[in-house]
Amino acid sequence: MAKSHVAALVLALAAAGAMAQQQPAMQWETAALAGSYKENISEDEKIAGLSKLWSEVKYNFVDTATLEKLDWDKLYLEALPRVRATRSTEDYYRVLQELVAKLKDGHTGVYPPQELSDRMLGIPLLKTRPIDGRVIVTEVLDPGLRAKGIMPGLEVTAVDGMEVKAYAARELAPYVSASTPQDEELRTFGYLFLRGPVGTAPRVAFRDAAGKQFEQQLPRVSLEVRKAAMANSPSFEFSMLPGDVAYVSLNSFNDNSAAEAWLAAFDEIAKSSALVIDVRRNGGGNSDVGYKILSTLDDKAFLTSRWATRDYKPTWRAWNKEQPMYAEAPEAVQPDPQRQYKKPVLVLTSAGTYSAAEDFVVAFDSMQRGTLVGEATGGSTGQPLFIKLPGGGSARICTKQDTYPDGRAFVGVGVQPQHIVKQTVEGVRAGRDEVLEAALATLQPK
């Protein structure tokens, strides 16, 4: 072959390779499967949405052992007639929520269209929490409810004439996506408790410390009204406690404000004799925010979580070859060269410590920099993949598996504190923070 022909062939092959590498990414989300809201979307849209959800979970959900155990294809077939039988978009989304809840993953779930928010997500102006096997009022957001005798410390015993746990099992639990028992319990009897249509008012039975029982109707309000009634909780709170103990509550990692506030206050924090970091109410956000804070607690580099995701290769499937996982080693985060806190550190945790906040706790625990005090974390982190669904709703699917740097599991289990302390009903009624009290007691000279 002439040299000119060889050169042309080489160039052609190189160009073909470049084109193969530069092919545009597939358009994963299209308008065809994300139609606008209607009171009752068509049966075709419902089945298409179910099929899309089933397929995206099948190929992207990171916990393949759960898919196999559940027989995800069988669940899809069982859901088809239920989807066809729905007579409204609201009912359709309840079927999807119930299906996905079977995966038992807090970073996987179905979210109805915004138009259904008032019908599905109304909630009274109070907060509850499961404590000692009971449902306890922990905060009352409406002065009108307080005037009716509803106070923190009351036990909820029944809803609309049904024993409280039976009510939750029927009305809430089937739709709750949660990774651990403590996660499910907090969602069912805390975040989502008494959820229902805005404007309705469930009849709730209470019992006080003396055993006296009474009932009140609690009007459900929209999420916007509830949010406006709640005290604004900043991402960072700092105070000095007796004994020159610095108390820092990191309430959110949704943006960089917690890390920025930490760095701004660092010189004052550094004057303390010990430090208590509270992440009990931190539902997560961006893990890097917490890592910036941890970098000021040790002059050595620390490791973040180890992670993996599925690496699906169609040709390997054709060869009956086992599909691999793509894994990355933990990242080493370097210490802050300007700021270092050298004194004792305690971190407070609860089932409400979630997602990026758990990544923070895992890294802190691995650093062996101090003690974890409180209750096991929620046991759920990872990277969700968001997809659109017909009627204007959406879903998210956990695509990332995280572990301790040494491979120990915490997803599906929760990070376990070295010093387990639980809030009691008596503590709530007395206005005491028993977890913080226990943490401070460990700092006292023995």
Image (tube, helix red, strand yellow):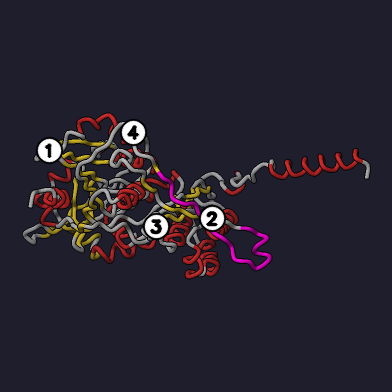
Identify the residue under disc 4.
337
Residue 406: which disc?
Answer: 3
| Amino acid type, residue under disc 1 in the picture | Asp
Q: Secondary structure at mark 2?
A: strand
Q: Is residue 43 visible?
A: no
Could you tell whether 359 is left or right of 4 in the image? left
Mark-to-mark CA distance, 2 and 1: 47 Å
| Amino acid type, residue under disc 2 in the picture | Tyr
Residue 312's place in the image compared with 335, above or below, is below
Tags 4 and 3 in contact by the CB under 8 Å rule? no
- Label 4 or label 3, whichever comes before in sequence order: 4
Q: Secondary structure at mark 3?
A: loop
Q: Which residues are magenta?
A: 313-332
Tags 2 and 3 in contact by the CB under 8 Å rule? no
Mark-to-mark CA distance, 4 and 3: 26 Å
| Amino acid type, residue under disc 4 in the picture | Pro
Q: Can residue 129 be found in the magenta stretch?
A: no
Q: Secondary structure at mark 4?
A: loop
The one nearer the camera, 46 or 441, is 441
Identify the residue under disc 2.
326
Residue 63 in the image, given as x and y percentages of width and height? 47, 61
Q: Is residue 124 visible?
A: yes
Residue 248 in the image, given as x and y percentages of width and height? 22, 39
